[in-house]
Image (spheres, rainbow, N blue to C red):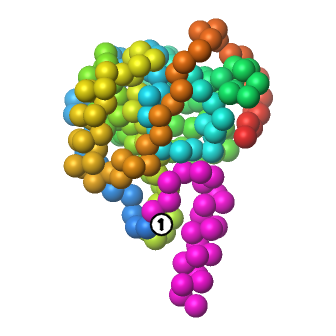
Amino acid sequence: MAFLYEVFLLTFVGSLVGAQVINWGRCPDFSVEQNFNTTAYLGTWYEIEKFPARFERGQKCIQATYELEDTGHIRVTNEGIDIETGEATSIVGDAYAPDPNEPAKLKVRFFWWQPAGDYWVLRTDYHTFSVVYSCQDFFGIVRAELAWILSRERTLDAIVLDSLLVNLEDMGLNINYFQSTNQTGCDEGQAKPSWDREEEHYLIFS
């Protein structure tokens, strides 16, 4: 009976979080970038490696642009290209640091009804690479994890990437989940945002 309960729980949680990585136990309390400089982090980052996620399935040329707003929050514009259709997709979200004493531990959401998820900047040098981690646990029993390795360019030096992976593995992250993002044949044009924040018009893309 206990085994069947565990299977049911994993299946249920998996249906909630799509293709995110599911593991047993609470979210780890990883260290984040010290003295995080939000202003230096702004701008465009390109996705190099990622944990599988349903909301990015079937996309290439994934990138994120961060812009500081008058409210002190950060406007997040995620863009990509549908591999099958070649159409550009885009969605706009809102990020903020709940605790100003820990500016590298951001929260972000893309829909008004959506609970804000973690966006922890574990490591960055601001001009070359960034390592981001997100985790949500369910009653401390299972957790859903996401992770990204980002670059200021569409490519990242192999030596730098290998060093980051070794560092993450030493921290206790299972780097076997990482998948490379296709950043070739990318159209630099901007896509129309799927979330028009001024009109509060929300669309869901699968």
Residue 165 placement (x, y as % from top left): 30, 39
Q: Specify the quadrant of the image occupied by residue 172.
A: bottom left
Q: Specify the quadrant of the image occupied by residue 150.
A: top left
Residue at the spot 66% in from the left edge and 35% down from the top edge:
58
Q: Is residue 52 left or right of residue 27?
A: right
Residue 26 visible from this viewpoint: yes
Q: Residues within 10 Å of mark 1 (few under 14, many from 20)?
A: some
Residue 111 placement (x, y as % from top left): 66, 38
Residue at the spot 64% in from the left edge and 57% down from the top edge:
16
Q: Which residue is mark 1?
A: 142
SS assignment for the magenta stretch, majority: helix
15 falls in the magenta region: yes
Residue 61 placement (x, y as % from top left): 57, 22
Amino acid type, label 1: Val
Q: Is residue 90 left or right of residue 36?
A: right
Local SS, label 1: strand
Closer-to-camera residue (171/198): 171
Whether 187 is drawn above or below 83: the answer is above
154 falls in the magenta region: no
Closer-to-camera residue (195/57): 57
Q: How many marks?
A: 1
Quadrant where the C terminus is found in the figure:
top right
Closer-to-camera residue (165/13): 165
Whether 51 is drawn above or below 127: the answer is below
Residue 37 visible from this viewpoint: no
Residue 185 placement (x, y as % from top left): 59, 15
Q: Is residue 38 left or right of residue 170?
A: right
Whether 13 is drawn above or below 193: the answer is below
Q: Which residues are magenta?
A: 1-23
Residue at the spot 58% in from the left edge and 76% down from the top edge:
7
Quadrant where the N terminus is found in the figure:
bottom right
